[in-house]
Amino acid sequence: MPRTFFIVYAGLLGAVVGSFLNVCIYRLPRQCMSILRPGSRCPRCRTPIRWYQNIPILSYLALGGRCATCKAPISLRYPLVELLTGLIFAAIAMDVLVVPGPFPTSNEIGRFFANSTLVAMLLATTIIDLDHRIVPDEISLSGLVIGFVFSLLLPSMHGTGLISGSEHLGAFLSAALGAGAGAGVVFAAGLLGKLLFKKEAMGLGDVKLMAMVGAFLGWKFVLLAFLLACFFGSIFGIVLRLVTRDQYIAFVPYLALGSAVMLFWGHHVLGFVSRHVLRSIPV
Ligand SMILES: [Zn+2]
């Protein structure tokens, strides 16, 4: 029962975090706005939104998707981001529970917070990139630091680590190596794209974003996340380009998707690749 409670709690927490992500998605690209102040207002009539009108998903339903004062329609995106974040957080809670027993272990709870932090930042970055075609440093660089801190506190994020002796230091080094690998592969791909296609293929924002992912996932997973992103991008990107005829292909959503796949199914992907692709090379 406490395990079920943990999963339900994770889902509710996710809905609240999703509500905060909505604020970040709106305000971070608008440099002059603070994340914390002022409180949320209706974008049309500027009426402050009261706390009971700001309950994730439920308030949107209760208000019928309209501002309580001026009846301006509220974007359906707000409750959808809250719902999606809630569902993903619940899925992460189920994913990290591996040790049988009535209660989640402290390690499992730590993994939950690390994984859901990464996913929340990837989700916000994806939507900001789709809207404004930028990756805010506020997310990628602070995410990089947060990834290092989590690695120091929670060495199990990086398996056995690189060096014996101090597993915390080992995990920290694994995070540093992961950040370098993530940044390096995107930077190299960007240079290659520039040489081949004579135009900007990857931005510095993508480099910093994958440094952050590498600090959480380590070098093997971040490299595979990048390969998955290229795979998803080439499939969906071609279809999207034919449909929308848009010259710009946002790459952040694919980077985020590849990273999320590695977060949930990384060991399966790594196993598949080492069995079928790298059979002769020990991984
Ligand atoms: Zn209003």
Image (cartoon, rainbow, N blue to C red):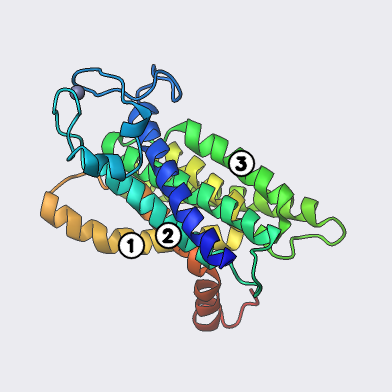
Q: Amino acid at mark 3?
A: Ile
Question: Closer to the camera: disc 1 or disc 3?
Answer: 3
Would you say the beta carbon of the disc 3 residue lies within 8 angstroms of ligand 1?
no
Is 192 located above or below residue 224 in the figure? above
Nearer to me, 122 or 52: 52
Task: Report the residue at 69% width, 58% height from top.
Answer: 106
Q: Residues within 10 Å of mark 2 (few under 14, many from 20)?
A: many
> Do the CB atoms of the residues marked 2 and 1 lie less than 8 Å apart?
yes
Would you say the beta carbon of the disc 1 residue lies within 8 angstroms of ligand 1?
no
Instruction: Tell me the SS state at disc 2.
Output: helix
> Disc 1 versus disc 3: distance between alpha carbons?
27 Å
Is 3 located above or below residue 139 in the figure? below
Q: Which residue is mark 3?
A: 146
In primary-sequence order, the first of circles 1 and 3 is 3
Is 279 located above or below residue 149 in the figure? below
Nearer to me, 268 or 13: 13
Q: In the figure, is residue 207 to the left or right of 167?
A: left
Is 44 located above or below residue 225 in the figure? above
Q: Residues within 10 Å of mark 1 (few under 14, many from 20)?
A: some
Instruction: Tell me the SS state at disc 1.
Output: helix
Q: Which residue is mark 2?
A: 258
Q: Which residue is mark 1?
A: 232
Q: Amino acid at mark 1?
A: Phe
Q: Amino acid at mark 2?
A: Gly
Residue 181 in view here: no
> Disc 2 versus disc 3: distance between alpha carbons?
20 Å
Q: Quadrant of ligand 1?
A: top left
In primary-sequence order, the first of circles 2 and 1 is 1
Q: Position of residue 224 (x, y in %)?
A: 50, 64
